[in-house]
Amino acid sequence: MITTKTNKWPLIIAGPCSAETEEQTLGTCKMLAETGLVDMLRAGVWKPRTKPGGFEGSGLVGLSWVAKAKELTGLPVGVEVATSKHVESAREFGIDFVWIGARTTGNPFSVQELADALRGSDALIFIKNPMTPDTELWSGAVARLLNVGIKAEQLRLIHRGFSFYGHGAYRNPPVWHIALEMRSRFPDIPMVCDPSHICGNRHRIGEIAQKAADLCYDGLIVESHIDPSKALSDSAQQLTPAALATLIKSIRWRKSTTDNPEFTNALDKLRGQIDEIDSEVIELLSRRMQISDQIGEVKKANNVAILQGSRWANIVERAMSQAKELHLSQEFLKTILEAIHIESINRQNEVMNK
Ligand code: PEP
Ligand code: MN
């Protein structure tokens, strides 16, 4: 249900990853409500786990605790739904909003099942990004809900980062430009950031949350547990309600207050996008150069020359056909490729003559 509470900007949603016990659910939710900084409460009762055998959620009894948390705090409550049965149960327990998890958004069969189950509902529906950085898949989930008559004003997007191969600074790197692309595709659907699942640990949540605020997101969804070290899921990333309050108070939301807010907002958003994309381009260039170094090693070991004309011609040819598709001028792309090629040759040269 849409209310002034659910339409607040910035919207702050908090709650445990999972409703584990009645005591933990109510205790956490009560403390969060008492901060006066939280607009809506979340708690998972069906947990999608990578491997069987972990804590898979408290199910229906958990739903009853979430419903009690609503009664106790007066705040709207939400759970994750992945099947039509979940939707039905959430409705029976008077749950105010639902979210579609990252694993589910990536599965069109499941999203369609949920859309069919949600037909006619006036609940607020949050759609997390899929595990893979695929704007089409995320857009497709939005389209499936709109197609069954869900109104755009009932929809919200959650940016929770994307799965990747290997270990890095984040559990799910944000790849901001994918989220920003979604925002420009659906300018009327608010987007909140989930720094908890992006980070996977408590330490960088503040940094990511501030970045989301800098990029003019519409709010945050953050995991909080009364005793994080004992949490049955996502223990490393949950904050105590007190730490959550400190975090929320520390964030500077960038809604402009100058004479012409529309102009400055638009400019801020665009500059934020540019900065993020630039830093990703630089990171990609660095990765590309590291691969060039490895190629240098392989060529050295096999006593093969650096320059192989046909390979370079193929690279240019492929880029030129991509340039057309992506509306980039061939001249521009050639300039960039040549600069990359020169640097790549220099790096290989260095490796081969070490
Ligand atoms: C969650 O919100 O607890 C959750 C399982 O998130 P995600 O779908 O983003 O992994
Ligand atoms: Mn979680």
Image (spheres, rainbow, N blue to C red):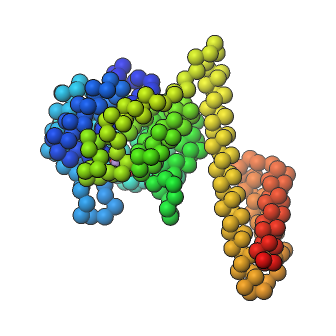
The x, y position of residue 345, in whole percent, is 81, 69
Q: Quadrant of the N terminus?
A: top left
Residue 297 visible? The answer is: yes
Please tell me which residue lies in front, 335 or 253. 253
Vertical position of residue 14 compared to residue 135: above or below:
above
- Quadrant for residue 272, please give it: top right
> Is residue 102 toward the left or the right of residue 30 in the image?
right
The x, y position of residue 197, in whole percent, is 41, 48
> Is residue 253 toward the left or the right of residue 345 in the image?
left
Please tell me which residue lies in front, 199 or 318. 199
The x, y position of residue 173, in whole percent, is 51, 52
> Is residue 343 toward the left or the right of residue 248 in the image?
right
The x, y position of residue 227, in whole percent, is 26, 44
> Is residue 198 toward the left or the right of residue 307 in the image?
left
Residue 86 visible? The answer is: no
- Quadrant for residue 289, please give it: bottom right
Residue occupying image coordinates x 72% and y 69%: 292
Q: Quadrant of the C terminus?
A: bottom right
Residue occupying image coordinates x 79% and y 60%: 340
